[in-house]
């Protein structure tokens, strides 16, 4: 089954997401991160690169921040693709130290 989720941006735009619910449950169990939480990184600055692996579709990897206070900012990695005008989330996890460093350098942030 496919689930749909929408987020409102500060300027009134609606971002639409979808994912497979079984994959979302597996991801939450494995990485302790829900796709609902992962989707929120797209409300702020994200660093997005093309996924070099061949999956039969164009996939992207986005890095963004979860958390509100400077002490609690965590960089996460979200693998996704675009389908029918929606962002389809494939997986989400905490960024590796190297990925976090690249994100921090790119945006001049200090995160965990």
Image: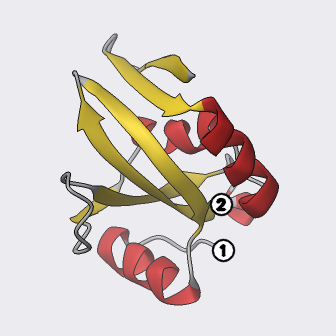
Position in image of residue 5 (x %, y %) = 52, 19
Work out which residue is located at the far top of the displayed protein and give it: 12
Element type where label 1 sits in the image = loop
Q: Which mark is residue 112?
A: 1
Of callouts 1 and 2, which one flags the residue occurring earlier in the amino acid sequence?
A: 2
| Residue 84 placement, left or right of 101 | left
User: Which one is nearer the viewer's eye here, 25 or 96?
Assistant: 25
| Residue 19 placement, left or right of 80 | right
Element type where label 2 sits in the image = loop
- Quadrant in which the N terminus appears: top right
Label 1: few (<14), some (14–19) or many (≥20) C-alpha neighbours in 10 Å: some
Alpha carbons under labels 1 and 2: distance apart: 6 Å
Q: Are marks 1 and 2 in contact (CB under 8 Å)?
A: yes
Q: Is residue 19 above or below residue 105?
A: above
Q: Which mark is residue 48?
A: none
Q: Disc 2 marks which residue?
A: 73
Q: What residue is at 60 percent from the left and 40 percent from the top?
A: 35
Q: What residue is at 59 percent from the left and 71 percent from the top?
A: 111
Q: Is residue 43 above or below residue 76?
A: above
Q: Quadrant of residue 20?
A: top right
Q: How many marks?
A: 2
Q: Quadrant of residue 108?
A: bottom left
| Residue 72 placement, left or right of 8 | right
């Amino acid at each position: 089954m496919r689930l749909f989720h929408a987020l409102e941006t500060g300027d009134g735009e609606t971002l639409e997401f979808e994912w497979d619910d079984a994959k979302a449950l597996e991801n939450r169990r494995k990485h302790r991160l829900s796709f609902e939480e992962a989707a929120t990184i797209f409300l702020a600055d994200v660093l997005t690169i093309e996924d070099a692996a061949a999956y039969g579709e164009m996939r992207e990897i986005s890095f963004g921040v979860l958390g509100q206070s400077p002490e609690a900012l965590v960089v996460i990695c979200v693998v996704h693709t675009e389908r029918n005008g929606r962002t389809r989330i494939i997986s989400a996890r905490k960024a590796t130290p190297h990925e976090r460093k690249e994100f921090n350098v790119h945006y001049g942030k200090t995160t965990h």
